[in-house]
Amino acid sequence: MADVHYESLHDICGRIKSGELTATQVTRTLLERIESIDGELKSYVKILTDSALATAEKLDKDREEGRPLGALHGVPIAIKDLLYTRGVATASGTKVMENFIPEEDATVVSRLKAAGAVLIGKTQLTEGAYGIHHPDIDPPLNPWDETRWTGVSSSGSAVAVSAGLAFAALGTDTGGSIRFPCASCGLVGIKPTYGRVSRHGAFPLAESLDHIGPMTRSVADAARVLQVLAGEDANDPTTLNAAVPNYFAALSDQVAGLTIGVDWNYVSQGVADEVIATVRQAVEIFVECGAKVSEVKMPASYEPLVSDWSVTCGVECARAHAKYYPAQKELYGPVLAGLIEIGRKSSEDDYAALEIIRGDFSTALDALLGDVDVLLAPCMPALPPAVEEMNDPASFDEARADFLIFTAPFNYSGHPTITLPAGLAAGGLPKSIQLIGRKLGEPTLLRAGSAYERLVEFNQHPVP
């Protein structure tokens, strides 16, 4: 049992369903691994030992008695600690909410449970899902290199999956918070179309920008988790009334007939040479798979959505924290407090102007994606940077702006993205690429991602 922790979610679920393994065995194995190494990695806020084992035992009994088994039957999965869990504290990375105990589960948590997942723990995140961990919290460490950034804000989710402490995790993404951690930790991550996955029961950073999605070690695993999460929810009026396709059936080794768009100016200006080289290698791989690559031009309207993202995010964040801030300002770290102050000081005209630009960009991007099937871009302009570079409150604003160029525009527009591992750099750090698709175009992203994954064959792990 000691070697199961790096198996795919797909395979481990199959072995449990077949009776080769039990959910209890697998859950105990992961709990032992968490106890052994997570004291150093710090990916989890809380380990749900008792409830996880009770769930696993019930699932094993269900199988023995011939009851129907869910799509994630018996698989230990981690959830970001801003997703409400009934009866369990949900701190959202803050001190001000550390004793908040929800009375209901988030919709995505309910859907995981209904699919037979074993919720093994709640993962650490930056304060309020913004850019830096609260000063009183020890941040998770990147298992590839503890001196390097884990990505934010779904840092603990990425570390847990990368280090074999969960078979998948849920993250949220407001300006890159699934994509940055997946890129930094060598994972697959999906930021779905806005409204594809319910946000009910997720404490917001910025409601109009927030997305919830899976973080996994393979494209197939991401497809399986997304299948469970996706769909309309009466409790979230922003969810889409659209049929959920079979995402697993979309997986393919071939992308013949697909057209991949690349704006070489967009993907190379101010971008590290090794990242540009990774994009060029990805182009070669897609051509080898049978895709056509077309040079395109990104709508120029993306630029204010990068430079002024903190206005939209700040205004909506201030609304979300109005119950706590400024009344309990002393419990906030300087970076999240700074964002809220930006929001409190921004005018209605400032916010409204960005909403107009958002609409223009989204419309222009729809038109661009009418000519190509997906866009190819980096996730970040550099390999995972040093922790000190990204975690210094004094230089945070500048560091943030540099890293939002390939992420924030697609939070505004709501287009889906998939982050894909692209192997390891010479120094051992993960490389990555990002694909951006049409709204509700997750099947195409999964198809392209699985073909790319097959040729890259990224199967390294950071911790034995």
Image (spheres, grey):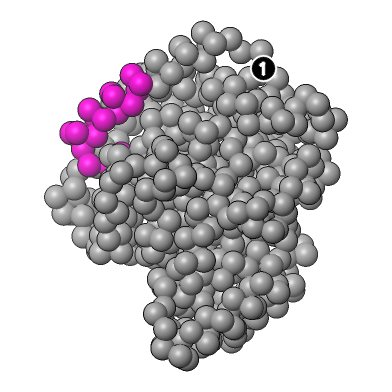
The N terminus: image quadrant: bottom right
Q: Residue at x 36, y 51 (%)?
A: 231
Q: Position of residue 165 (x, y in %)?
A: 62, 68
450 and 23: which is toward the camera: 23
Q: Residue at x 55, y 52 (%)?
A: 106
Q: Residue at x 16, y 54 (%)?
A: 256
In the shown orientation, is residue 272 left or right of residue 453? right
Q: Residue furthest left?
A: 257
In the shown orientation, is residue 12 left or right of residue 99? left
Q: Residue at x 38, y 30 (%)?
A: 413
Instruction: Provide the residue span drawn in magenta.
Output: 359-376
Which three-letter amino acid code belongs to the residue tagged 1?
A: Arg
443 and 323: which is toward the camera: 323
What is the crowding at mark 1: few (fewer than 14 residues within 10 Å), some, or many (at least 20)?
A: some
Whether 349 is drawn above or below 45: the answer is above
In the shown orientation, is residue 208 left or right of residue 56? left
Q: Which residue is mark 1?
A: 344
Whether 296 is drawn above or below 194: the answer is above
In the shown orientation, is residue 423 left or right of residue 154? left
- Classify mark 1: helix, strand or loop: helix
Q: Does the magenta portion include 365?
A: yes
Please identify the quarter of the rendering in which residue 277 is found.
top left
Q: Position of residue 86 (x, y in %)?
A: 64, 57
Please identify the quarter of the rendering in which residue 255 is found.
bottom left
Q: Position of residue 19 (x, y in %)?
A: 46, 90
Q: How many marks?
A: 1
Please identify the quarter of the rendering in which residue 55 is found.
bottom right
Q: Does the magenta portion include 339?
A: no
Q: Position of residue 191 (x, y in %)?
A: 43, 45
